[in-house]
Amino acid sequence: MNSLLDLEKLDAQVRHADLIKEIRRHDEAYYQQDAPTVSDAEYDKLRKELEDIESKYPDLITKDSPTQSVGAAPSKGFKKVKHTIPMLSLSNVFSEEEVEDFLTRIRRFLGLAEDEPIEIVAEPKIDGLSCSLRYENRKLVQAATRGDGTEGEDITANVKTIKDVPQTLPDDAPDILEVRGEIYMARADFTTLNSAQEAAGKPVFANPRNAAAGSVRQLDPKITAQRPLKFFGYALGQVSAPFGQTHFEIREKLAKWGIPETSFKLCSSLQNITDHYEEILKTRTDLDYDIDGVVYKVNRLDYQERLGFVSRSPRWATAHKFPAEQAITRLKAIDIQVGRTGALTPVARLEPITVGGVVVSNATLHNEDEIKRKDVRVGDYVVIQRAGDVIPQVVKVLEEKREGNLPEYEFPDHCPACGSLAIREGDDVVTRCTGGLICPAQAAQRLKHFVSRLAFDIEGLGAKIIEQFYEEGLIQSPADIFKLEERNAALETPIREREGWGELSEKNLFDSIRARQKIAFNRFIYALGIRQVGEATAKRLAATYGDLQNLKTMMAAAQNHESEAYAELLNIEDIGPAVADDLLGFFAEEHNRAVLKDLEDLLEIAPYQAPQIGDSPVAGKTVVFTGALTTMTRPEAKASAEKHGAKVAGSVSKKTDYVVAGQDAGSKLKKAKDLNIEVLSEEEWNALISG
């Protein structure tokens, strides 16, 4: 990921935390004190902005986010559901050129000729709440949200109140069938619901998606039953028996079984695809439900199987998002926000303006270089765009409208949160605070990340509570979280006696903390908040090193850039010298090693378990492919190996289990023989993984 995209994500994290804090403050005033501090319209703008951020960055959604509730309290009480097949998100494209690149990548992966047509199913991208329906013996037995893709919330009782969702399927349906789709609210129904809310003196919803999500996450199914929710199905999870060879056939069969379907079109060329996209773009306002793009899926299921997945999205599908909308407004001020990694991010404070149906008052300026490149000055008129219809950003300055001799903006050289020196290192475009853990902005943000959904996922420790406990000195480091119950017993005013708390909420908090004292190794790595180490990289590190002790040992050895340990680190997919430097820098820092030691004494960090498909003989094994392959492309070979639980490396070492040698294999084959590593032909490898 390039640095500008990193900054967009960082901007979103900073703004996301601010929005949660602000909305919770308004919720408390409205629901608990009957003294609203903002108008309903202004409140809805804040909710909409938060929802848009979480729509683009689902990993920012936390249990305490206002989008997970309707009213003052966050959604609680839902059981967790582990998806049998992960519910992954989609990659995005924004232009015809990117769609063409998507098709080219598919052809290259599958080894198809450039002129060979690929059938694509194009379907509208519903702006709703993702949901998985599980049928066993043709009866609906479970419904779950996407959650983090691996684990979601059990919303079965609520979904059973949705009239669109069939409770039973016909006799020709398979014994096990998981249907993935979207829960949504039609525009007309949304308008009617908001009118009823307003008449009852209740807050109106910001948009249909927010209304649908809030309705589904009600703990009382009777409330959900009163809401006009609907469902569209469009994909499959686990299926006990195949019932089609193409995605088009699957969609037709689901419709025959009573699963509500959107329109979908079979396209055989880039021109077909773009023509259909333009048609949907023109007619989107005529639909009675919100869409924010068009999804393209490879039609042949055998191609989908071969293409597989990368990180959190399938290779065989992508979402073509609608273009961003723009508006002109005046820039009133530039504020600096300090993120979890110490990055100083400039934020434009704007005269409020409507962009794409949402009132925008803040926008990202990315970094110091972007401000200079665009020559942004306080008082300028600027063009604002909601990137991908989500994150507002300053596109350009209208210099012809500049009034007088406005001074150039001077980027601060000290952190506004702690006063520490702020510097740029090397070619880095980001200015960072050097205060580290002494910087209150970073410490609190690091703790919020530590307990976030994809990390330790501790319910009850939301952003507001973390900030409160940090300011009071109850939680200053990650280890303090797991000592909180013991410390609470010695407090003059225990947590249960504080405003907004009680015995039950205190008990639930400590139960949640205790439940997370055993954690998967990859989640633990992600929770540490190491710069440039996201969820996917954390999984790769866990798969490579197995457990924390080995990771620490190898990171210590890899401090020597001439060592085999450093070479092995660089051999991990997506880890280049920059990511390696951040990793090694983290483990070289004494106070970070002290944090790890404290956590090891308090936690059970479960070693990485390689995914196994049945009795895969290569699960957990390391394989290197070399030479020209004839029965599959190199990307396909790699994806197939990973699907069977193997780790694919780029170079041969003592830890390599198999080397698969194609035609004209060279130095890697020689090294394998020198190290007595088992060498397989392409045919032998295929026979091994197929059992």
Image: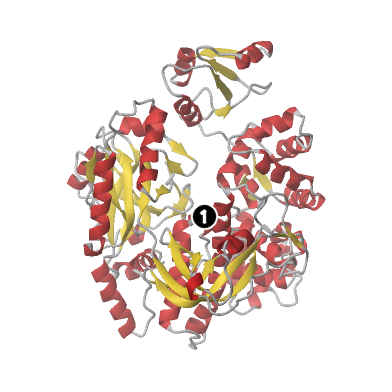
Residue at x-position 49% and y-position 17%: 628
Residue matched to label 1:
59
Tell me, yes or no, if residue 306 can be seen here.
no
Tell me, yes or no, if residue 207 can be seen here.
yes
For the C terminus, the image quarter is: top left
Q: In the shown orientation, is residue 570 left or right of residue 633?
A: right
Q: Secondary structure at mark 1?
A: helix
Q: Residues within 10 Å of mark 1 (few under 14, many from 20)?
A: some
Residue at x-position 52% and y-position 62%: 63
In the rendered view, tell whether residue 499 sits above or below residue 147: below
Foreground residue, 485 or 231?
Answer: 231
Q: Position of residue 71 (x, y in %)?
A: 45, 75
Residue at the far left in the pictured view: 256
Q: Position of residue 381 (x, y in %)?
A: 49, 74
Q: Position of residue 240 (x, y in %)?
A: 32, 35
> How is the protein colored in the picture?
secondary structure
